[in-house]
Image: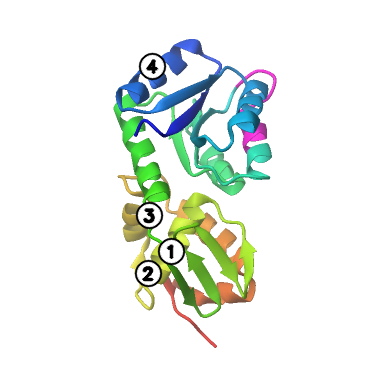
Amino acid sequence: MNDITILVVDDESRMRKIIRDFLVKSGYNIMEAGDGEEALQLFEKNENKIQLILLDVMMPKLDGWSVLRQIRQKSKVPIIMLTARGEEQDELFGFELGVDEYIAKPFSPKILVARVEAILRRTQGAQEQVKSYGGIEIDTEGRTVKVDGKEIELSLREYELLKYLVDNEKIALSRDKILNNVWNYDYYGDSRTIDSHIKKIRHKLGKKGKYIETIRGIGYKFEIKK
């Protein structure tokens, strides 16, 4: 994994050191920033090298949300938010802005590394393949989605959720099953996280959003309808 570079952004040098030590031990290259402005400068200079960002929320000069917004204007790089706040509303807010993962402090460094590896496996290991589902075209190599030939912007989590739904076309999927397979770890948050993602995906799919059907009392199902 020594060709993978992760940008760690946190104003606490001790926290950066803990994260750096565990990730370096796992074979990753690390870049560090102590505030939001430095993070944006580093990312701008090294956008082609950085494959994942660990981003703190509360920082001087420019907070994590502001950094996230600016990066998402031009990049789909996976971003894990690190925050001392563990409230559901903060988590949902992060997902709305395009966060791929959300970890509340304090956390186990080993669990952090496991989640980093899970995200990188999904982003690095896609097979070269393009499939069409009723006008929705999914390129698993480029991790892009087109609707009637026009590419739409999806966060990593939105992409993976849509991919999981289409891979299980016509199958009613419970929220628990979706969490276990898409989030890929034991998730203790509210299932409304899924509902929030589904709402955004439907909106981005436009008229094709009707393909994602709500199954009352269960969850969701993808089925192509004319």
Tell me the kind of residue under disc 2. Answer: Asp
Identify the residue under disc 1.
Answer: 163
Q: Residue at x 48, y 75 (%)?
A: 132
For marks 3 and 4, the one nearer the N-term is: 4
Tell me the kind of residue under disc 3. Answer: Val
Identify the residue under disc 3.
Answer: 182
Q: CA distance from mark 1 to mark 4?
A: 34 Å
* Magenta-drawn stretch contains 62: yes
- Measuring from the top left, give residue 94's x and y in whole percent: 56, 41
Identify the residue under disc 2.
Answer: 167
Q: Residue at x 34, y 31 (%)?
A: 113
Q: Residues within 10 Å of mark 1 (few under 14, many from 20)?
A: some
The stretch in magenta equals 59-68
For marks 4 and 2, the one nearer the N-term is: 4
Residue 188 can be seen, yes or no: no
Q: CA distance from mark 4 to mark 2?
A: 38 Å
Identify the residue under disc 4.
Answer: 18
Is residue 58 left or right of 169 when viewed as pictured?
A: right
